[in-house]
């Protein structure tokens, strides 16, 4: 069942990355779903218009399942190909070029992984690949650490968006370092999209409250007991966090301040 | 003439040469393979007369199927038994001397390292027998040159037969390393059914008019002159749904029909799958 559309009841500018405008600040992955029908319904419920896909070999014996586009209407979503699984700049660039040749767009979610256990990025390789791909006309969305210096270098290298992690890919640990994510957002001109690590709706909300431009997630939805309902929750949380950021929160105080008048009390 | 060099070479040793009814077994193998098979008579223990008699018997069993008799080292026996080729070992006669004795036979040289490969090419060997590629049951601790010796031998431009531990499963690796064909001893003669083993080997070796390719990491055969568009068609793949990389270069959709594939080409066919 498709969730009712909740139109934002607040004024916000559209998200713009690399010259393209997007409706939703929530981007979702297409991996790890138990079946394709659940994936499609969850993506619908998320309200996302950007969906990520991976580049892999076509199975040559046709008994195996078809590619994701067999199930997903490519005309309704913006397909953002990733370079997941690439451990060198060279590999990532190879995957990026193959993805672009599919003919959908010039965007690439660039991952250059540096370690198998944590899937943390190899920032040297990432910078190298970002620089080269940007030269080749790619709109590079670079998956990176929540490290300001790398984020600044990526922007210099021509990234169209910088994507710091909330916590490691698929970990569900939530936003581990709000301060660093916030400072990255405050220093970059290009959009900052937090990618990876959220586990549930409150993580998404807290992340958006930092003022970042968007959030990308996959496992938190795909591995929920009910992915379609979790997708709906993530949509609300993303909008909620964004609205709260725009509204501007009250200051934190370590003493209580009464909410009711202190005058007019009975003697 | 070299183009007709068989792809599969069944090499005998002293033990096999003494098998009772060897000519009958060889005839059954030749019936499977036809001109794709050569049987090498290789033994150092038989006296010349006995060797010649066996060579004639094997030649008579092979000839009706178009399969080849090859004699190792003994150019004199090769000439008299009308063998199609002579293979000279490390300590055997040189190519020029073999030609003097058996002028109508091809001459192959057994090579094991870069120096031997250079020497064999310099003396004009028609083909090279390169090994030991893998560890063998007969020499489990012997020196193994790996597929590198095949690559180095193939770089001379002469046909190369890979030898040493070859099995049907490993034959395509040898071909992808540049071997024209493979030579085997135990994988053929020690098989429960040597004729069936011949069939298994041939399935892994290029047939005439076919080329060996690697498609998505799998060794495959394709007919010579095939284009990428035809390859996709053979695989029942929609060219609009895949991206094609040919020897590390992306081929645009509109160029697929004009791009032929060639021996040893590496082709990657990719599409989008679910991912984060």
Image: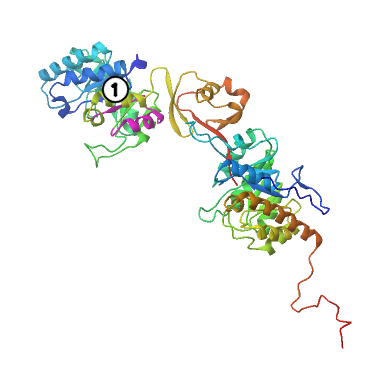
Badge 1: how crowded within 10 Å, few (<14), some, or many (20+)?
many
What percent of the width, then of the height, locates residue B121? 34, 25
Q: Closest to the observer: B51 or A139? A: A139
Magenta-colored span:
B164-185
What percent of the width, then of the height, locates residue A224? 58, 53
- Residue B232 in the figure: left or right of residue B25: right
- Residue A179 in the figure: left or right of residue B241: right
Q: Closest to the observer: B97 or B5? A: B5
Does the magenta portion include B170? Answer: yes
- Name the residue rendered at 61%, 56% in the picture: A197
Q: Closest to the observer: B115 or A57? A: A57
What percent of the width, then of the height, locates residue B132? 29, 34
- Name the residue rendered at 61%, 42% in the picture: A53
- Quadrant holding the C terminus of chain A: bottom right
User: Does residue A54 appear in this view?
Assistant: no
What percent of the width, then of the height, locates residue B98? 24, 18
- Name the residue rendered at 77%, 60% in the picture: A245
């Amino acid at each position: 069942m498709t969730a009712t559309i909740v139109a934002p009841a607040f004024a916000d500018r559209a998200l713009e990355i690399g010259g393209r405008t997007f409706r939703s600040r929530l981007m979702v992955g297409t991996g790890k779903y138990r079946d394709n029908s659940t994936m499609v319904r969850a993506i619908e419920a998320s309200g996302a218009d950007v969906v990520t896909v991976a580049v892999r070999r076509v199975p040559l014996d046709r008994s195996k399942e078809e590619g994701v586009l067999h199930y997903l209407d490519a005309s309704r979503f913006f397909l953002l190909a990733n370079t997941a699984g690439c451990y060198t700049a060279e590999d990532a660039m190879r995957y990026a070029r193959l993805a672009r040749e599919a003919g959908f767009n010039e965007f690439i979610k660039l991952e250059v992984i540096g370690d198998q256990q944590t899937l943390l990025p190899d920032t040297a390789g990432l910078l190298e690949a970002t620089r080269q791909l940007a030269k080749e006309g790619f709109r590079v969305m670079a998956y990176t650490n929540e490290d300001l210096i790398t984020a600044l270098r990526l922007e210099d290298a021509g990234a169209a968006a910088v994507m710091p992690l909330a916590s490691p890919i698929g970990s569900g640990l939530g936003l581990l370092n709000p301060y660093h994510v916030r400072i990255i957002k405050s220093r970059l001109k290009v959009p900052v999209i937090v990618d990876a690590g959220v586990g549930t709706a409150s993580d998404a909300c807290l992340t958006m409250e930092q003022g970042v431009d968007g959030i990308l997630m996959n496992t938190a939805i795909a591995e929920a007991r009910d992915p379609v309902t979790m997708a709906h929750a993530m949509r609300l949380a993303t909008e909620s966090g964004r609205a709260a950021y725009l509204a501007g929160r009250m200051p934190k105080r370590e003493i209580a301040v009464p909410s009711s008048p202190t005058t007019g009390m009975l003697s | 003439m070299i183009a007709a060099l068989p792809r599969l070479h069944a090499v005998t040793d002293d033990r096999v040469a003494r098998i009772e009814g060897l000519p009958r077994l060889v005839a059954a193998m030749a019936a499977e393979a036809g001109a794709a098979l050569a049987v090498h008579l290789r033994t150092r223990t038989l006296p010349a007369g006995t060797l010649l008699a066996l060579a004639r018997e094997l030649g008579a069993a092979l000839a009706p199927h178009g399969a080849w008799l090859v004699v190792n080292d003994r150019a004199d026996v090769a000439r008299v038994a009308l063998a199609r080729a002579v293979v000279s070992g490390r300590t055997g006669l040189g190519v020029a001397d073999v030609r003097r004795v058996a002028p109508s036979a091809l001459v192959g040289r057994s090579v094991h390292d870069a120096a031997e490969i250079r020497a064999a090419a310099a003396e004009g060997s028609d083909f090279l027998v390169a090994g030991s590629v893998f560890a063998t049951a007969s020499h489990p601790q012997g020196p193994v040159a790996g597929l590198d010796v095949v690559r180095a031998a193939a770089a001379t431009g002469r046909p190369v037969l890979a030898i040493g531990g070859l099995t049907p499963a490993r034959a395509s690796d040898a071909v992808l390393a540049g071997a024209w064909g493979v030579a085997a001893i135990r994988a053929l003669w020690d098989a429960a059914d040597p004729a069936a083993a011949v069939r298994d080997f041939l399935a892994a070796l290029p047939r005439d008019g076919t080329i060996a390719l690697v498609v998505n990491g799998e060794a495959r055969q394709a007919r010579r002159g095939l284009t990428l568009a035809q390859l996709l068609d053979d695989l029942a793949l929609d060219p609009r749904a895949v991206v094609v990389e040919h020897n590390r270069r992306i081929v645009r959709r509109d160029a697929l029909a004009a791009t032929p594939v060639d021996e040893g080409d590496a082709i990657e066919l990719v599409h989008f799958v679910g991912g984060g």
